[in-house]
Image: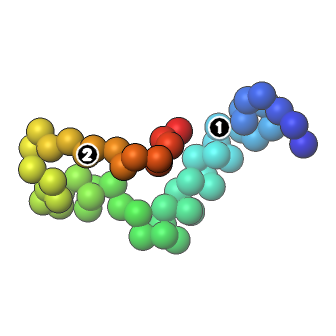
Amino acid sequence: GVFDEIDDVISRDEIESFMACYMAATGFAVEALNAAPRTLPEGATLTPRPGVRRG
């Protein structure tokens, strides 16, 4: 259906439960990511490629 806010159709508890299962299934671990070494030097920025829209 059509809705403006996800909270209108599913409770916050259901969203959090779904996200916890999704993150476990995909191997996403916040603690592990935060503990990992940097992949880019501090202060590094990325230059957008011409013709690639963001957002």
Q: Closer to us: mark 2 or mark 1?
A: 2
- Label 1: state its secondary structure: helix
In the rendered view, tell whether residue 46 sits above or below residue 19. above
Relative depth, front residue between 45 and 50: 50
Q: Amino acid at mark 1?
A: Arg
Q: Residues within 10 Å of mark 2 (few under 14, many from 20)?
A: few
Question: Which secondary structure, mark 2?
Answer: loop
Report whether 47 appears left or right of 42.
right
Task: Give the label on residue 36, or none.
Answer: none
Nearest the camera: 41 or 17? Answer: 41
Residue named by callout 1? 12
Which quadrant holds residue 6?
A: top right
- Count residues near mark 1 (Cα–Cα under 10 Å), then give few for <14, some for 14-19, many for 20+: few
Residue ranking furthest to the right? 1
Please say if 41 is above or below 4.
below
Disc 2 versus disc 1: distance between alpha carbons?
A: 34 Å
In this rendered view, identify the residue nearer to me: 39 or 13. 39
N-terminal-most mark, 2 or 1: 1
Residue pointed to by mark 2: 46
Residue shown at 49% from the left, 61% from the top: 23
State the image coordinates of residue 47 (x, y, percent, origin top left): 27, 44
**Is 52 placed left or right of 48 in the picture?**
right
Q: Position of residue 22 (x, y in %)?
A: 56, 62
From the viewer's perspective, is 14 left or right of 49?
right
- Residue 30, position in %: x, y? 33, 54
Percent across and percent down for residue 19 are 56, 54
Amino acid type, label 2? Leu
Which residue is at the far front?
Answer: 50
Q: Residue at x 27, y 58 (%)?
A: 33
Image quadrant where one finds the N terminus: top right
